[in-house]
Image: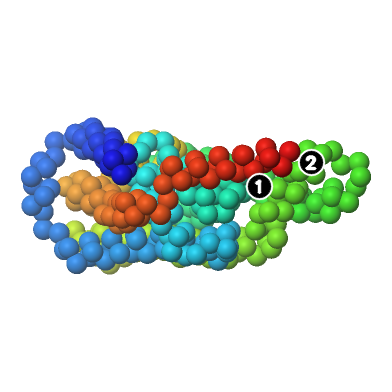
Amino acid sequence: MRGKYIQLAVGIAITCLFLFLAYRNLGNVNIARLLRYPVDYFYVLLAVFAFAASQWFRALSWTRGFAPDIPVRKMFASVCMGNGSNMLLPFRMGEAIRVMTIGQMRRDYASVGVNLVLERLLDVFILIVLAVSVAFFVPFEPVVEAKLQLIRNLMLAAMVAGGLLLLLALRLRPRVLASEKTPAVARRLFHFLDSLAVFKSPLVIVRALCYLVCSWGCVYLSTVFGLMAVGIYGSKAWVASLVVIVLTNLIMLIPSAPGGIGVFQYACIYSLSLFDVHAFQRAILSVLLHLVQYAALLPLSIYYFMRGEFTVREIYRNVAKRQRARLSER
């Protein structure tokens, strides 16, 4: 039990350090004035609820797609713990926690890692669609527009290449397994791919994508409610929120500080500057929208962490058991 508290304290300490370093560089902003700014906390609560709901839909994208054999409650706990750890630890280390917790349930860490990569590719696909949509009616600066176009082109190329490789693997699978000349390595690779849900039924990708779209829709609503909380309404709130989630999430694809602290604020402030939002409101929203994510994720992740449904000791114990079983089989 003491180890849990130490891990939790270390994560919180790292986050507080990055928060201090990031918010110190927001400019000549009076923190006391930020705290006294009239915020509609009803919309803040709606924003927190919508962001928490996005994690539920993300869990459903696994239980209805990638891993239908896992209960929704367990998967939701894993998603909350993983994404909550991303808010506390640098370099998106929560992804490793998700692989370990889901792998503990399935007794298969490799396929979980591959499915997690597929989930992130679907996230990238959704962000590409949103970025292309945003580019039609938002006047970015030429430098930013060029960078966005480069990112979109690279992502589209990666998605096309990944899709072609997937189709090629599906098409070659029967021939490779049927041929006696197939090398053992290739045979093992295709047997491993057979364990992935997407190879058993390509509709898995469609189902997972639908739930991930719902998840991103909740993130979008959370951002809209955040803007409404500081008095930005109407079409400005709806369009600006779309730009905010595109730029903040594109820039946070690169592993960085816990929760993307610093880069999130930069992307948020720049996005809102395109819509003539007052400088002080931009500073408030760069803090408020980030705190909404912390308020939605941290209580849930700490709750599941303290319940002990997944413990590092149990994960290592299961891995050791699997290794001993394989050695005994040999």
In the rendered structure, the answer to whether residue 118 lies left or right of residue 199 reads left
Q: Is residue 89 above or below residue 268?
A: above
Residue behind mark 1: 162
User: Mark 2 = which residue?
Assistant: 186
Q: Secondary structure at mark 1?
A: helix
User: The residue under label 2 is which amino acid type?
Assistant: Ala
Q: Which residue sits furthest front?
A: 328
Q: Is residue 102 above or below residue 6?
A: below
Q: Residue at x 19, y 49 (%)?
A: 284
Q: What is the x, y in percent for residue 165?
A: 71, 47
Q: Residue at x 76, y 43 (%)?
A: 188
Q: Position of residue 175 (x, y in %)?
A: 87, 51
Can residue 12 be seen by looking at this rendering? yes
Hey, what amino acid is under mark 1? Gly
Name the front one of labels 2 and 1. 2
Q: Residue 250: tell me if it is visible.
A: no
Left or right, 180 with reference to 112: right
Within 10 Å of the Cα at label 2, are there few (<14), some (14-19), or many (20+) other Cα atoms? Answer: few
